[in-house]
Amino acid sequence: MTETLKPRVQGGARIEKWDLLRALLIFLVVLGHMVDYYTADSVRMRGLYLFIYAFHMPCFLFVDGLFSKRNVNERRYPHIFSFLVLYLFTKMLICLVQGIIAHEFSFSLLESAGLPWYALVLFLYNLVTIFLSRFSHRWVLIASVVLACFIGYDSNVGDTMALMRAIVFYPFFFAGYCLDPTRVAEKLSGKWIRIGGLLVLAALAVICFHCTDDFYFLRPLLTGRNRFSALGSYGQVDLAFFGGLIRLGYYAVVALLCTALIAVMPSHLPGGRVFTAIGRRTLQIYTLHRPILYVLYSGLHFDAMTAAAGVSNLVILPVAALLTIFCALPFWEKPIRAVIYPKLHRPEGGAD
């Protein structure tokens, strides 16, 4: 999600396809956070929530894994630790905004249930992958999937250090690390592959919007932070007992969805400079959008305002687009990067 993971080929030229994909994914992050304010009262919003969360986080982590090779292989610890700085900064910024709105401050350094978890797991993923990269990639991937299929039964793992999410989503990051972005883009550029991708995404939309209540029980699984006990039961079936198998099926489905999304993403979009700019500035969008949403919903009660005005809750689509563009403005880039990537100076005579 961050600019330290640059979508470039070996020659240094950016691959536009990945910038466009990142632009779409960060928009879905913003939209997904807005949708969650409406899911309690709207079936349509629950369907949109299922559609977004079915793939957007795993796909984002896969793309981050694709462009993590330099950090991992070259042991670029200053860049890796920038994710930890990002985690701390976003936690403090959100705490400050929430405190001002609610007149009550609550800060937990290690508990990460909200937005900052993503930066924390990227920090952990890069460090862990430095160690695991020396082993057979196939067996690391298999072992990470097996662990994720069992971790949901552990009642001691949860939001502390975002450990549950870190384990559940790691296979997507590591799969990206194992692959070459140029070859992935080339392999998925065929006409029939793109058509197949469109059909897969269309099928997902049909399922999410026309069978919403039949599949909404999977919501705890999609967030990656819940134990299998949160699945409850389906009819007379205790889903928690089958949680490991359900997660294994989830991995298969999400792998297909991510493949489909990458396949349908164009390699070039005429007049798409706005979108590629957004794809290059996902870090600042990630950092800024959540505090703004707290102001919008907890401070200004935007959901109540739109309901009182008789406006459809689909108004959040253009609002999410405008918020994404606003947070992507060049104005924010320098101050955000100054915080996340501070220039460190060694004292004179200091050892290398």
Image (tube, helix red, strand yellow):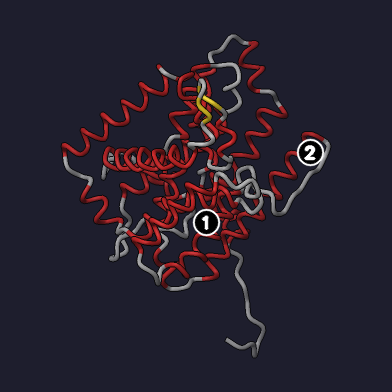
Compared to residue 201, the image places residue 41 above or below, namely above
Give the quadrant of residue 51.
top left
Q: Residue lying furthest top in this view?
A: 310
Q: Earlier in the sequence, mark 1 or mark 2?
A: 2
Q: Amino acid at mark 1?
A: Leu
Q: How far across and down, in percent of the image, does residue 233 sit? A: 54, 26
Residue 288, x across and y down, in percent: 60, 43
Q: Secondary structure at mark 1?
A: helix
Q: Which residue is mark 2?
A: 100
Q: Is residue 270 visible?
A: no
- The residue carrying pointer 1 sits among few (fewer than 14), some (14 to 19) or many (20 or more) residues within 10 Å by Cα, namely many
- Describe residue 166's horizontal placement relative to residue 59 as left or right: right
Coordinates of residue 243 in the picture (x, y in percent)? 49, 38
Residue at image coords 22%, 34%: 196
Camera-near label (1 vs 2) is 1
- Say whether residue 135 is visible: yes
Residue 122's disc is 1
Amino acid residing under circle 2: Ile
Q: Front-most of 267 and 32?
A: 32
